Image (cartoon, grey):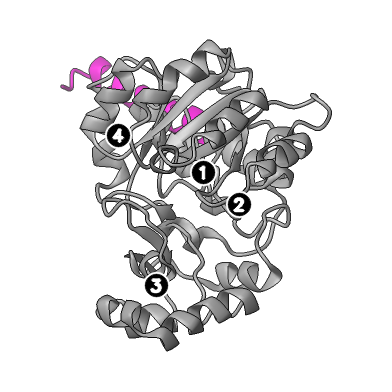
Amino acid sequence: MLKTFLTEQWGLRYPLVGAPMAGVAFGRLARAVSEGGALGMIGIGSSDPVSKIAEESVVAADGGRLRYGIGLMAWALDRRPELLDAAIAAKPFAISFTAGSAAPFVASVRNAGIKCIVQINSREDALEADQADADLLVVQGTEAGGHTGDVATLPLLQIVLDAVRVPVVASGGIATARGLAAVLAAGAQGAWIGTPFLASPEAGHSPQARKRIVEAREDETVLTRLFDRVQGVQWPERFPGRALVNDFTRRWQEHQDEAVANEEVVASLRGAVAAKDFSLAFIYAGQSVGTITRERPAAEVIAEIGDGAEALLRSRFASLLASGSKRLLMGGE
């Protein structure tokens, strides 16, 4: 059995946390992830009603039987502080913050007896969160789906592991046992995964979206602000979104100002979202989407990643260390 901070201190069966993907990670997915031995998270969007937090928490907790977390967008809390108040009132196991400074909110969360998780995209973000006494850092690389930064997972993970004292998990491009084994070997305490659940039936995606996700290749994503700009969503500029390429991005990615100013284009995207027409509507997904080949329950995804990573680490490290010992015995360097 794998032993990390997440399994030893947080009581998880596997060192995995489900990413709180707004619009996808509702209470049902959070419950399924927690039942599978990881930590399920509910994603709360910047415009979601406050009531959604309590409603989805009831589903995720399943009568208090399961631990779960709630994910908030830090940049949205300045104008909607009631989201944090409602999240604390729900008394989840953990609350996470992404896209913006979490420093003003860490103490309130921890004082309520709730674990505080901060997702970061740079060395500076990590140092700030460490100084603020977050319980866990999520090092998110640009390979991740949804809104992210522009530094890849592995370089950022190496930098942050050497810079902070707080436990760290890795996010971005991790979707299989090999990915989890790699970041554990590097020193992370686990992985924060979202894209692997996009085709799970417990996720909030429609059947049409799951079909498109299963069909997508690893080279069919784009890092873009196009969808946010056309919809008028005020995400900070430093956090573009990684989404699947479609006809809308092919036509407008290099002409975003024109798209924003064109009322017909704006209306076409709005209509496509309502109609679940993904030739135009967005699906946020990471570069690991190419590893998803079929729809699978969340618990099956978790077990395959967690058990597979343990087997890989046992086999690989035994082989590496045994080879090293043999060379030494033979007088090699």
Q: Reply above or below: 35 against 153.
A: above
Circle 1: element type: strand
Q: Assess whether mark 2 and mark 3 are in contact (beta carbons under 8 angstroms).
A: no
Circle 3: element type: helix
Residue for badge 4: 157
Q: Position of residue 104 (x, y in %)?
A: 37, 24
Residue for badge 3: 230
- Spatial CA distance of label 1 from label 2 is 8 Å
Question: What number is the disc on residue 197?
Answer: 2
Q: Position of residue 197 (x, y in %)?
A: 61, 52
Q: Closer to the observer: label 3 or label 2?
A: 3
* Disc 3: CA contacts within 10 A as few (<14), some (14-19) or many (>=20): many
Residue numbers of the magenta segment: 310-333
Circle 4: element type: helix
- Spatial CA distance of label 3 from label 2 is 27 Å
Q: Position of residue 253 (x, y in %)?
A: 30, 76
Q: Which residue extends farthest left?
A: 333
Q: Is residue 324 magenta?
A: yes
Which amino acid type corresponds to the residue marked 3 in the rendered image?
Val
